[in-house]
């Protein structure tokens, strides 16, 4: 358990490379054109969606005009993608300007099922059908149940969907969790993981027993069942006996690249953002359940191999070999948010993509997960919510970390909430007049202007 919680509570003290990406004025174009009009390299990208207006994954804006979107191998639409979902994208990317063109975007939920127990206030985890799901302040939370507005309010019996980084053995680090209904009722449950303890037509996924005696098998036969296979199971859940009665068992690939390599048997370049789910030895890791090989040519940034532990967040680039393992050319340690801040935006610097809340300056970049919960926003505003939509006076909830070298704050998640008064009640009349004059301006407030106003009112700004 200590190693697992390392993901949520251990923050690297290594230098973190800051990628400040200026959002495109015409994001819907995604930064490129298909065919000869786009100059980029072909690769597979696995990462979390941080925004739309194009699809933004790992800080890259991908044009999706001609992309095929798949939900569990069934063709869907981009409208069904949501911030916080872990997806696998195949396409082209231009690393010089962080733009790309998507060919295929695939989403596979890790769980859609019933909550057994909520341990959020104990160790920030939930037991969902025998799987331990860890959440933190970077997890995107949504709820279709009006009475459930926070993780701690989730109760046994609630029907939820989870997407995140999984080791396949029953532990999931959630990047998105949505409460879909107060109870499951007649809904089919869904779960994927690695088979263990297989006996005839029964096996275990995490801590859940699966009975596949009467199941339909897809991409495999019942006699093909083996320990270590990754499968997706759909069926009915018996909470009293912790049993999933399978209606369908589908064989899934354990690697993100094999489905593409099988097309033309070539080596594919991969970029992945994820969690270390196993440390096999000094040269072999598992990231999101995918084997990653380290060698003398692997460039390490902000991370030491000997210090890598289960639960560490990393990003990597590499090439897929004949065994569909990733040979890492670069591995970078990722710093997690260590602070949270809730308040009203006082200043916006559009050029630097920086805001000030409660006197604290925070950078918002292309990897920041953005979510709009403001009641006055319509569906389009919520979906395409971006830095450009922020306004002075907006109430926001921010998770962020402080770069130890550059001494700047970088947001990992920003949620806009219901607007409050643009002027704090405890300000003096003099400060109210100065601040209101700035707030009413059509131009963005500059940090220098606010500092000048606050100095005249004997109010300090914390950097």
Image (cartoon, grey):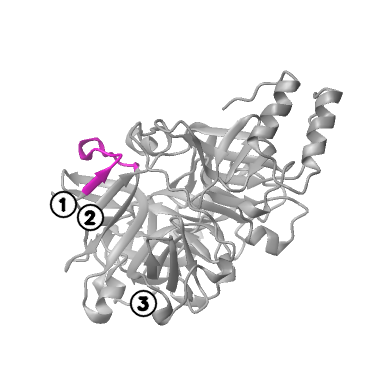
**Residue 232, image quadrant:** bottom left
> What's drawn in magenta, residue-wise?
299-312
Q: Is residue 55 left or right of residue 90?
A: right
Reading the image, the residue beneath label 2 is 329
Outermost left residue? 296
**Residue 404, image quadrant:** top left
Residue 260: percent from left, percent from top: 30, 74
Q: Residue at x 43, y 67 (%)?
A: 100
Using the numbered discs, state the Cα–Cα distance from disc 1 to disc 3 in whole angstroms. Answer: 40 Å
311 is within the stretch colored magenta:
yes
Q: Residue at x 32, y 65 (%)?
A: 256
Q: Residue at x 38, y 39 (%)?
A: 7
Residue 240: percent from left, percent from top: 50, 51
Instruction: State the SS at label 3.
Output: strand
Q: Residues within 10 Å of mark 2 (few under 14, many from 20)?
A: some
Q: Nearest the camera: 84 or 99?
A: 99
Instruction: State the SS at label 1.
Output: loop
Reading the image, the residue beneath label 1 is 297
- Identify the image quadrant of the C terminus: top right
């Amino acid at each position: 358990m200590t190693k697992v919680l390392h993901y949520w509570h251990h923050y690297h003290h290594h230098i973190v490379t800051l990628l400040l990406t200026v959002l495109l004025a015409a994001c819907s174009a995604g930064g490129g054109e298909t065919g000869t009009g786009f100059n980029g390299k072909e690769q597979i990208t696995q990462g979390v969606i941080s925004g739309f207006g194009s699809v933004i994954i790992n800080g890259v804006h991908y044009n999706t005009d001609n992309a095929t979107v798949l939900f569990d191998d069934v063709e869907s639409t981009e409208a069904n993608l949501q911030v916080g979902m872990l997806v696998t994208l195949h396409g082209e990317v231009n690393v010089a300007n962080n733009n790309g063109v998507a060919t295929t975007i695939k989403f596979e939920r890790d769980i859609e099922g019933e909550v057994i127990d909520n341990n959020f206030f104990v160790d920030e985890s939930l037991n969902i059908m025998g799987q331990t799901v860890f959440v933190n302040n970077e997890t995107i939370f949504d709820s279709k149940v009006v009475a459930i507005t926070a993780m701690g309010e989730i109760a046994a019996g609630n029907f939820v969907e989870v997407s995140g980084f999984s080791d396949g053995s029953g532990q999931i680090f959630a990047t998105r969790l949505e409460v879909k209904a107060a109870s499951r009722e007649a809904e089919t449950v869904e779960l994927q993981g690695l088979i263990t303890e297989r006996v005839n037509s029964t096996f275990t996924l995490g801590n859940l027993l699966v009975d596949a005696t009467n199941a339909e098998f897809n991409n495999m036969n019942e006699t093909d069942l083996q320990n270590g296979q990754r499968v997706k199971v759909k069926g009915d859940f018996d909470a009293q006996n912790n049993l999933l009665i399978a209606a369908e068992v589908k064989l899934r690939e354990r690697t993100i690249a094999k489905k593409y390599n099988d097309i033309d048997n070539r080596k594919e370049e991969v970029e992945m953002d994820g969690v270390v789910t196993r440390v096999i030895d000094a040269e072999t890791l598992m990231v999101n359940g995918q084997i990653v090989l380290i060698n003398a040519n692997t460039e390490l940034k902000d991370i030491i191999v000997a210090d890598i532990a289960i639960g560490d967040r990393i990003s990597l680039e590499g090439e897929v070999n004949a065994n569909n393992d990733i040979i890492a050319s670069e591995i970078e340690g990722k710093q997690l948010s260590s602070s949270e801040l809730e308040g009203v935006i006082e200043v916006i610097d559009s050029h630097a993509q920086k805001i000030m809340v409660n006197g604290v300056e925070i950078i918002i970049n292309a990897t920041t997960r953005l979510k709009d919960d403001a009641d006055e926003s319509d569906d389009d505003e919520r979906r395409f919510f971006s830095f450009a939509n922020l306004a002075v006076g907006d109430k926001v909830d921010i998770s962020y970390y402080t770069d130890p070298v550059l001494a700047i704050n970088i947001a990992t998640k920003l949620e806009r909430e219901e607007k409050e008064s643009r002027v704090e009640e405890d300000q003096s009349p003099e400060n109210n007049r100065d601040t209101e004059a700035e707030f009413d301006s059509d131009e963005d407030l500059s940090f220098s202007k606010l500092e000048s106003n606050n100095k005249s009112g004997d109010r300090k700004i914390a950097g």
